Structures are given as structure tokens and as C-alpha cells.
Amino acid sequence: MQASEQNNSWTEIITPKTNVLDLHLKEVWRYRDLLLLFVKRDLAAQFRQTILGPLWHLLQPVFTTIMFLIVFNKIAKISTDQLPAVLFYMGSITIWNFFASCLTTTSTTFTTNAAIFGKIYFPRLVMPLSTVMSNVIKFAIQFGLLIAVILFYQFTGLYNFHFGWYNLLLPVIVVIMACMGLGTGIIISSLTTKYRDLAVLITFGVQLLMYITPVAYPLSYLDKSGYKTFIQWNPLSHLVEGFRYSIFGQGTFDTNFFMYSILFALISLLFGVMLFNKVERNFMDMV
């Protein structure tokens, strides 16, 4: 019996995690091919059996920008910080869509992939990472549309675009926004294994969150309002404002509040991963 056991050559040894900070990042890296396969699956499945396919990535910000122009610019007469309204709204919508997609897709990691998790082993963290990576690709498509609109305004003389040091903030803000979307998303995903009500709340919760974030209005619009202090402590406010500032060099950019947003994103990511690791041990008994 002992001889037969010694002859066994194991290719994978699965051991339980004893520490919530045991991230197994090397193992995640070894499964990078699977991660890329999940990214391709997400992109292919999203618009399967649709007529326009990936063009919906472009039509969504266009239609939303038109609605913002009508409601917030023409009817409500809300200022856009001396930026052309189209550029202001499209920039806001581009970064907001990225965060909202990261949050909503990762928030259903456990419930939507329970069948896969119950059949085969792989690092569970691969799944939410793959959804964030697929959303990065969608963001790149919408950001390309924003660049095309900026070039149109530049060549027609409607807006003069200038390069500056503030452009260097752009990749930083995108990464921090991805971290915040991933962190808060996996926190909600971990909690929905036990409290299914959160899955219902998250859909319209993200929509309500947009209105307390300066997406359709600049933060400066609230200078004479008592609500500015409340909106300022929303960590998303300074990332959205910072995104517009990183492209156009205009708007409100407060370094202290920006650092607060970064700290909030990192803490939410760390707490989310810890909770994710704790829940994945026995979530199959609850879903």
C-alpha cells in the first residue's frame, strides 16, 4: 500500500487557506491562460445573437451623452466648467461606465459561476479579475470614441486641446477606479452568497450613486450649496473630477481628497480580497 502511494505522481495539491491574506498570487499567475480565456468568453458572450454586436459599446455613451445634453444642459442649464458640454458629459460617462461595469459584474461572481466553481478547481480570484480585464477593454473602446470626439473639436476649432503634466494622471485614475470597482464588487459578491437581497439592491443602487457623484455636473456647481461637503466625501467624486482634469486640465482637482480616494480604493480592495478568501472556503454550501 505504501509503495503504491509513493508511486503516485501528483500534478496538483490543493490545500485549504489558513489565512485570509493568503492570496496565492503566484498561483493566479500560473492560471493566466485561463484568465484570458474567461476574458474572451465574457467579450464574446455579451453580444452574442445581437445585430450590432460590439458597436453597442460606442452607442451606449453616445445615447447617454445626448440625454445628458437635453436634460442637464438644455433644460436644467447646469454649467460644465467652461468645457463643451459634449466633451464634459462624454468624459464623465466614459469613466463612470467603467466603474459601474466593474462593480456590477464582479458583484455576481459567486452566484453566476457557482456551477463552474463546483466542478473544477482554479484560483477563484481569477474570475473577478477576468471581468475587470474585460471591462478594461470596453473602457478602451469608449475612451477611443472620446479621443475621436476631442480630435473633431480640435480640428473644427471648437476646443483647443493642450498636453500637460495632468495627462499623466490618466492611467493612475483608471487603475484606482478599477481597484475600487473590484474591491467593492467582490465585497458585495461575498455578501450575496448569504444575503441575496444585495443582488437586487445593486442594480438601482449604482444608478442612485451616479447622482451623488459629479458625473452630470461639475463639483464647482455645488460651491454655493450645502451639499458640497457631503458630495466631497464620496471617494468617486474626486476620481471622476480627476479623470476630466487629467484629459482637459480643467475642473476641480484637490490633492488631499484625491489621496483620500486612493486610500479608500486600496482599503476596499484589501478588505474585499480578505472577505473573498474567507467566503470561498464554504460558499458552495450556501449558493
Image (spheres, grey):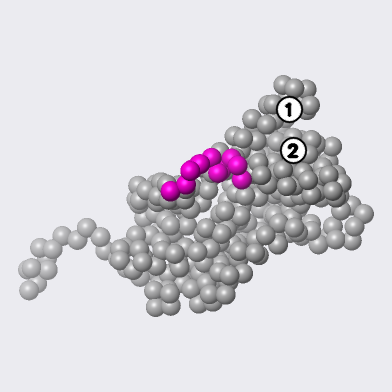
- Which of the two residues, 104 or 251, is positioned nearer the viewer here? 104
User: Residue 128: percent from the left, percent from the top?
Assistant: 47, 57
Q: Residue at x 83, y 41 (%)?
A: 81
* Tag 1 secondary structure: helix
Instruction: Work out which quarter of the rendered image holds the N terminus and state it.
Output: bottom left
Q: Are marks 2 and 1 in contact (CB under 8 Å)?
A: yes
Q: Residue at x 84, y 48 (%)?
A: 75
| Residue bounds of the magenta highlight | 48-60
Q: Residue at x 76, y 49 (%)?
A: 216
Instruction: Work out which quarter of the rendered image holds the C terminus and state it.
Output: bottom left
Q: Residue furthest front?
A: 51
First along the sequence among labels 2 and 1? 2
Question: In which quadrant of the rendered view does residue 230 lie?
Answer: bottom right
Question: In which quadrant of the rendered view does residue 18 lie?
Answer: bottom left
**Residue 176 seen in the current view:** no
Q: Pointer 2: residues within 10 angstroms few (<14), some, or many (20+)?
A: many
Q: Is residue 1 above or below residue 136?
A: below
Magenta run includes residue 227? no
Horizontal side of 273 relative to 86 (left or right) equals left
Q: Residue furthest right?
A: 224
Q: Is residue 269 above or below residue 139?
A: below
* Tag 2 secondary structure: helix
Horizontal side of 271 relative to 246 (left or right) equals left
Q: Pointer 1: residues within 10 angstroms few (<14), some, or many (20+)?
A: some
Which residue lies under the disc numbered 1? 153
User: Residue 132: percent from the left, percent from the top?
Assistant: 51, 51
Q: Main secondary structure of the magenta part?
A: helix
User: Residue 191: percent from the left, percent from the top?
Assistant: 53, 72
Horizontal side of 33 relative to 9 (left or right) equals right
**Residue 27 seen in the current view:** yes
Residues at marks 2 and 1, CA–CA distance in whole angstroms: 10 Å
Which residue lies under the disc numbered 2? 86
